[in-house]
Image (cartoon, rainbow, N blue to C red):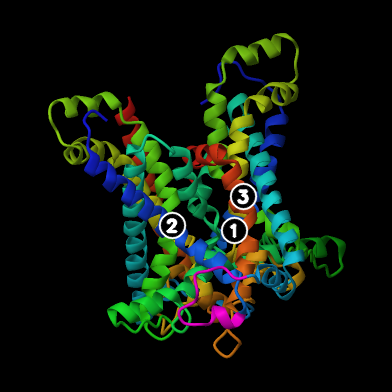
């Protein structure tokens, strides 16, 4: 900075290279392992020079892990969660900032409190709701004895039964993860910094609220939306617990879950080359998103404090 | 807060918040209420018959030796993971901040693990530490004479999941430390340098205290991460074993509820976790207050 410190500079570079090495070693090793035949990968110690079996291993992993359909499912899930999170939260933030209505405060606080309810703390009941989305309505009806009441008035025995299961469906994978306190908060903060004059001008020109939203607010929010797309896509792609719970049909499961079937067990042939080739395939889309949208990624991370 | 100039409409705002409200009522508040309700009920494994039992589930839970063990493991796991990844993240960020050239390349090389799913991080580290094929297990045995076996030894397994969890989180900490370091005014550090403070002293006396809000925030966020987002790592690497030595509280909720079908206990554990996350969220917002004081 001010003085010349050759030794410190040397130390800086050494530590940096060491740090990058520690962070990068697992990936390097994964790539090497994915290029080796099975007898090489189980040699002790494993050679550190890449072999020529990469394409073979990738293909085996793709077929054995049924990754084609599962990568597609992961993509749908990640894209659905991204689109859902951003659109429900931007609409809610628009309502909260630009309209005066009775439940405005409650709406904001109730979204905010979902921060304290990650899926991990409500595993079983969320599964139950997803198994029958009308379960809550049915239970409320049962509490008020609505069926007995109708039976009393009509003279017939009456039973209300509505069931709709989201297990093993895209909606079930996506919907329960769509609410986002952080995105709502981010859009709210951003809308509060938008100059008042814009809204006044739009009103004078006779623009409807939705026209103001689509023509002015949405284009202004572009950078925020881009940042959230990166963060939410990675979040959706890397989901593990939720798809594990609600998918039983392998055709509906996601790529990260599918990988588990590729891990060799004690009694199997140690085909770690195939398992790690599969890991490479599955990690590629989110890693590419981070690398190519680095600027948005850093902004998204710091802004949402995710 | 509301804009000075706003729209008025009878039905439009309700329509706009409807999608979000439906989602949070159905998939957040209803299940949370159910968990609370079920934690006071004793049900058979199929949930057909149930009976109100007050705090029986909780007292049963807190008399359970294995639950206490799980609490201990979770705390040890979370704080080790947080400390390890925060210290590496801070070290690399402080070094990267000193470098003038190649900043973008260094950043690129350090942020990509954020994109790796916890479950994949688990698979990769499981291979690196595999007792028969893993290169790290081999090196440890060759040079340190330690027989490494995370499949049989509980401590080895816990160490392995800490490493796999901390590795993935380094990039997150790095990004926040870099942001924090860049917000420190250069003039402060230059003034100290002119006064003759050595680079190390400048770091300890100026940079580190000014980073403390970031540090505190990251400590909370890393503990939250280790508590709630490492399920994938535990599930792929150890499944809570061997002998429950990596059974974190979240994994135990899953195991007791989904595999063991003990609904009451699982619900009571969920309620305990809710209390934990409420405390952590309050702590996190203490940071927001602090940050405001520093900047303004």
Label count reads 3
Image vertical order of residue B38 relative to residue B229, above or below: below
Image x and y of residue A218, in percent = 68, 28
Q: Is residue B66 magenta?
A: no
What's the chain of the residue with tag 2?
Answer: A
Image x and y of residue B151, in percent = 44, 83
| Circles 1 and 2 on the same chain | yes
Residue A23, numbered circle: 2
What's the chain of the residue with tag 3?
Answer: A
Callout 3: SS:
helix
> Based on the displayed image, in which of its 4 quarters is residue A87 positioned?
top right
Instruction: Give the class, few, some or many, for how many residues have Cα within 10 Å of label 3's Cα (few <14, many ≥20).
Output: few
Can residue B59 be seen?
no
Callout 2: SS:
helix
Q: Which residues are magenta?
A: A38-51
| Circles 3 and 2 on the same chain | yes
Pick the front one: B98 or A111: B98
The overriding secondary structure of the stretch rendered in magenta is loop
Cα–Cα span, label 3 and label 1 = 14 Å
Per the image, the residue denoted by label 1 is: A238
Which quadrant would the C terminus of chain B be assigned to in this image?
top left
Q: Is residue A50 magenta?
A: yes
Per the image, the residue denoted by label 3 is: A288
């Amino acid at each position: 900075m001010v003085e010349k410190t050759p030794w410190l500079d040397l130390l800086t570079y050494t530590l940096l290279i060491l740090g990058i090495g520690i962070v990068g070693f697992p990936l390097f090793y994964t790539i090497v392992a994915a290029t080796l035949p099975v007898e090489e990968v189980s040699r002790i110690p494993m050679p550190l020079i890449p072999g020529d079996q990469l394409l073979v291993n990738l293909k085996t992993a793709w077929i054995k892990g049924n990754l084609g359909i599962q990568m597609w499912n992961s993509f749908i899930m990640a894209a659905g969660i991204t689109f859902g999170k951003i659109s429900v939260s931007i609409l809610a933030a628009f309502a909260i900032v630009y309209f005066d209505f009775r439940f405005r405060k409650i709406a904001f606080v109730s979204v905010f409190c979902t921060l304290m309810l990650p899926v991990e703390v409500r595993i079983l009941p969320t599964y139950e709701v997803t198994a029958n989305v009308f379960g809550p309505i049915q239970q409320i009806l049962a509490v008020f004895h609505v069926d007995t009441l109708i039976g009393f008035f009509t003279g017939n025995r009456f039973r209300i039964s509505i069931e709709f299961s989201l297990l093993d469906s895209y909606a079930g994978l996506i919907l329960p993860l769509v609410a986002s306190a952080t995105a709502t908060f981010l859009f709210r903060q951003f809308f509060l910094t938008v100059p008042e004059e814009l809204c006044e001008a739009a009103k004078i020109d006779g623009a409807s609220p939705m026209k103001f939203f689509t023509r002015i607010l949405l284009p202004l929010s572009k950078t925020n939306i881009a940042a959230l797309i990166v963060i939410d896509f990675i979040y959706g792609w890397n989901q593990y617990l939720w798809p594990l719970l609600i998918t039983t049909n392998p055709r509906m499961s996601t790529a990260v879950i599918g990988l588990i079937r590729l891990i060799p067990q004690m009694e199997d042939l140690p085909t770690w080359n195939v398992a790690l080739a599969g890991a490479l395939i599955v990690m590629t889309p989110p890693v590419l998103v981070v690398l190519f949208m680095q600027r948005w990624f850093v902004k998204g991370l710091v802004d949402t404090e995710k | 807060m509301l804009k000075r100039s706003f729209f008025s409409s009878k039905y439009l705002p309700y329509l706009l918040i409807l999608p979000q409200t439906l989602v949070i009522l159905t998939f957040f508040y209803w299940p949370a209420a159910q968990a609370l309700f079920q934690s006071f009920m004793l049900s058979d494994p199929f949930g057909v018959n149930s009976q109100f039992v007050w705090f029986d589930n909780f007292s049963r839970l807190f008399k359970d030796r294995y639950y206490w063990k799980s609490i201990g493991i979770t705390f040890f796991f979370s704080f080790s993971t947080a400390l390890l990844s925060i210290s590496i993240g801070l070290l690399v960020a402080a070094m990267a901040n000193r470098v003038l050239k190649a900043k973008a390349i260094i950043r690129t090389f350090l942020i990509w693990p954020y994109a790796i799913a916890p479950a994949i991080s688990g698979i990769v580290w499981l291979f690196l530490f595999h007792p028969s094929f893993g290169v790290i297990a081999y090196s440890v045995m060759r040079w340190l004479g330690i027989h490494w076996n995370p499949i049989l030894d509980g401590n080895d397994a816990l160490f392995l999941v800490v490493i796999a969890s901390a590795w993935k989180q380094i990039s997150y900490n790095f990004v926040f430390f870099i942001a924090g370091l860049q917000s420190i005014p250069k003039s402060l550090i230059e003034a100290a340098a002119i006064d003759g403070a050595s680079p190390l002293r400048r770091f300890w006396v100026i940079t580190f205290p000014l980073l403390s809000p970031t540090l505190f925030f990251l400590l909370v966020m890393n503990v939250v991460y280790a508590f709630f987002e490492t399920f994938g790592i535990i599930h792929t690497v150890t499944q809570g074993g061997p002998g429950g030595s990596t059974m974190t509280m979240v994994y135990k909720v899953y195991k007791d509820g989904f595999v063991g079908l003990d609904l009451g206990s699982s619900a009571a554990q969920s309620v305990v976790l809710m209390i934990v996350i409420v405390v952590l969220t309050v702590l996190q917002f203490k940071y927001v207050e602090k940050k405001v004081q520093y900047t303004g």
